[in-house]
Amino acid sequence: MNHQNLVEQISEEIWKFENDNWITHFTWMKTHDDNYRNGLADHLVKEAACGSDDIAYIKILKSAVTSALKEKGVQAWQSEWDASNKGEITKTFFPL
């Protein structure tokens, strides 16, 4: 299981809350300590895991993201190269 993806998702959600002026605190709790909130959290997790809500997360490979970003970079560079009126001599050495 890729825990890094889960950590990134949680971090993004916390960031969204904090941008809406929410204050987030984390507290360590001993598991199975007969704490009402701990029991409630366990119940909610089980409910979410067994629930019928169709929540789907699309996982994109890092290599696919890297490839897409490189392609966008090349396209941006090419656009600037084509629009530039400087370096005309250099352009003659590198025809399209």
Image (cartoon, rainbow, N blue to C red):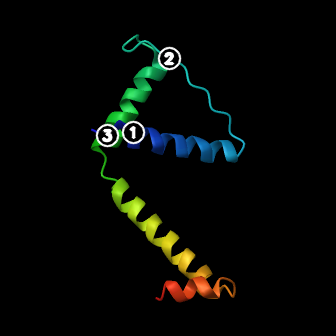
Specify the amino acid type for callout 2: Trp
Disc on the earlier residue, 3 or 2:
3
Q: Which residue is mark 3?
A: 2
Cβ–Cβ under 8 Å for marks 3 and 2 = no
Cβ–Cβ under 8 Å for marks 3 and 1 = yes
- Cα separation between marks 3 and 1: 5 Å
Nearer to us: label 2 or label 1: 1
Task: Name the residue: 54% across, 89% down.
Answer: 92
Give the number of the disc on residue 65. Answer: none
Q: Secondary structure at mark 2?
A: loop
In the image, taking residue 12 as reference, residue 65 lies left or right, namely left
Specify the amino acid type for callout 1: Gln
Task: Name the residue: 69% across, 47% down.
Answer: 20
- Cα separation between marks 2 and 1: 20 Å
Q: Which residue is mark 2?
A: 28
Image coords of residue 33 (percent x, y): 40, 10
Query: Crowding near pointer 1: few (<14 within 10 Å), some, many (20+)?
Result: few
Rendered position, 6 above or below 81? above
Q: Secondary structure at mark 3?
A: loop
Task: Name the residue: 35% across, 61% down.
Answer: 64
Query: Crowding near pointer 2: few (<14 within 10 Å), some, many (20+)?
Result: few
Q: Which residue is mark 1?
A: 4
In the image, taking residue 4 as reference, residue 75 lies left or right, namely right
Disc on the earlier residue, 2 or 1:
1
In the image, taking residue 2 as reference, residue 85 lies left or right, namely right
